[in-house]
Amino acid sequence: MNFIDKIIKLCTISPDKLDFKNEYFYKSTILNFYSYTSLALLLIFTVLNVFKENFINVIIEAVLFVLLTVNVIVFRKRGNFLNASLFYSIGFGLFLLWLLFKGNVSNQGTVFYALYPAFIILMLGKKRGNISSLVFFVLSSIVIFIPSFFGILTDYELLNQIMYVLLFFIFFIFVNIYENIWEGRIAELNVEIQKAKHETQSKEEFISKISHQIRTPLNNLVVVTNIVNTFNLDEKQKDLIDTIQASTNNLVNVVNNIAEISNVDLLQSKDYNQNFNLESTIRNTINLFTDEDSDDLKFPLKISEDIDFQLYGDPVKIKQVFLNLIENILKKTKGGKKLVDINIKKLSEINNVAEILFNVSTAELEQISEITKIQNTEKTKKGRNEAVIKLLEFNIANKIIESLGGDIEFELSTDKFEFKFILKFTKGEPLLDETTRRISEFDLPEIKSEGKIDLKDANILLVEDNLINQKIVLLSLKKVVKTVDIANNGKEALDKFGSAKYDIILMDIQMPIMNGIITTKKIRSLEKSTNSHTPIIAITANALLGDKEECLAAGMDDYISKPFQIETLINKMEQQLNN
């Protein structure tokens, strides 16, 4: 690193701390450089005036030195560029004018005053910089052209006066031209960035659409091929079917790879704001994992007693966050018993808005060494956070948290890894008395048990708008299920759900009139009044990033993406009936 690079590094402030990151990042480096240079010059002038016993100058320069030092410290801590730059320009501009009015500037010194626009416009921008420069020019010109009016003994020569005016406006015009070119280039880059974002979004939407369109017929190929494979085929027919099946499986892998590299925006989904109980929302989310192997998985949940009210917001997004966090923590945790601590507390409450801190920690991450390396190599907080989010695959949770106005922060100690985020919620309705006891069980109504139901005796509701898909599913379940009702969209599903008792619902997502997500939410709302719960399994061609989390967060019990093996669907149905 050369000398210039070291100076730039010294003067650079982290963009995370700036109030307007994009607009003022490079200007903040200029402000810091001017401030450090001014402090060095003031220190030299103060020492020289001490030796000259000019104590009035010493006091003024020392006061300005302290003020500029405080300004630098506050700026580097809080990042408020506008306040810091205005304070610097006013303070140092007045100091220069004071030197001029005191007669401490020689004929040759006026040339340096002509440089004022060169640094003030670069720092403040055209509008503020031009105003400051012109005010400074008027005040300084009065002294330079008629010094006797103020009793100043220095007699400025005509040549110096002309040179001052000429150089001042040369620098003034030059810097304005430079700023115009710079702003034009920035505008062009912003247009290119927006164009790139639009193109990326269009590509992602195209990939999502194509993925959905391919998966549906591909699923039919998989299912029909498996069914045909059970028939009594001769050797040649069997070979042809095996070839079709192998080709279909390769196509399945291709489609899955498309889904993995695509990252469709999660924030397009609408908010589902309502009053909700934070504890039950998180406990029900945890339950999706503990049912699998509750002996090896522990999720201690602690919520502070002062959160004795419901929150008004979108519980679906909270579920999506914890689904993504817990799933990836477990995936990246060493084998054996796994412990994930969840600690939630209220930080503050202002005007009926509560600030809630969510803290999640674990001690057995396999990526501890990689996280330590990131902490040692990444210099900025933003860089560290982005690297850890990518490493632990917290992208979904991070996007949702950012959409809610928060940021994930990470801490690594000798005994555990923890991350936290702060979200603000409007206070909702008070919790019922019995829910304030912080019992370890869910605070949902106890669901009435009607005994175990065999799959062959189960009453199934298939919600699917595509006629071919209906036939394929019916054909696949024909030998294992006796009764399957069909609803062509979400509205029909609600009508049938209100008039009949179903043991399992197989729910498509993309449907006309009412999609599967909204239908599931409405079914769960209806069940609150009947103390019942019907398992819902999503069967969908939506298999991109975030689709699974959205389905589970909406209230579905399981998720299966097309194409799938019929045995997988049957196993999931049996699991739900056993639960």
Image (cartoon, rainbow, N blue to C red):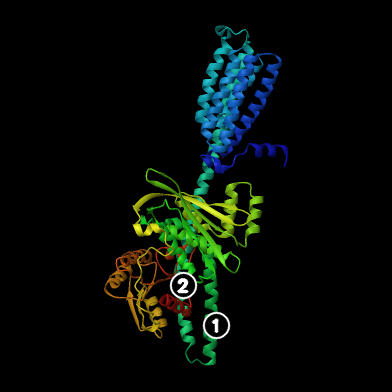
Residue corresponding to mark 1:
243
**Which of disc 1 and disc 2 is earlier in sequence?**
1
The count of marks equals 2
Outermost residue on the left side: it is 499
Q: Tell me the CA gap for discs 2 and 1.
A: 20 Å
Confirm whether residue 265 shows in the render: no
Q: Nearer the viewer, residue 563 or 305?
A: 305
Q: Residue at x 48, y 92 (%)?
A: 232
Q: Residue at x 42, y 62 (%)?
A: 439
The quarter of the picture where the C terminus appears is bottom left
Please state the horizontal and vertical placement of residue 428, each as a whole percent of the image. Answer: 35, 52
Residue corresponding to mark 2:
562
* Tag 2: amino acid: Lys
The 10 Å Cα crowd at callout 1, few under 14, some 14 to 19, many 20 or more, is few
The 10 Å Cα crowd at callout 2, few under 14, some 14 to 19, many 20 or more, is many
Q: Which mark is residue 471?
A: none
Q: Nearer the viewer, residue 333 or 471?
A: 333
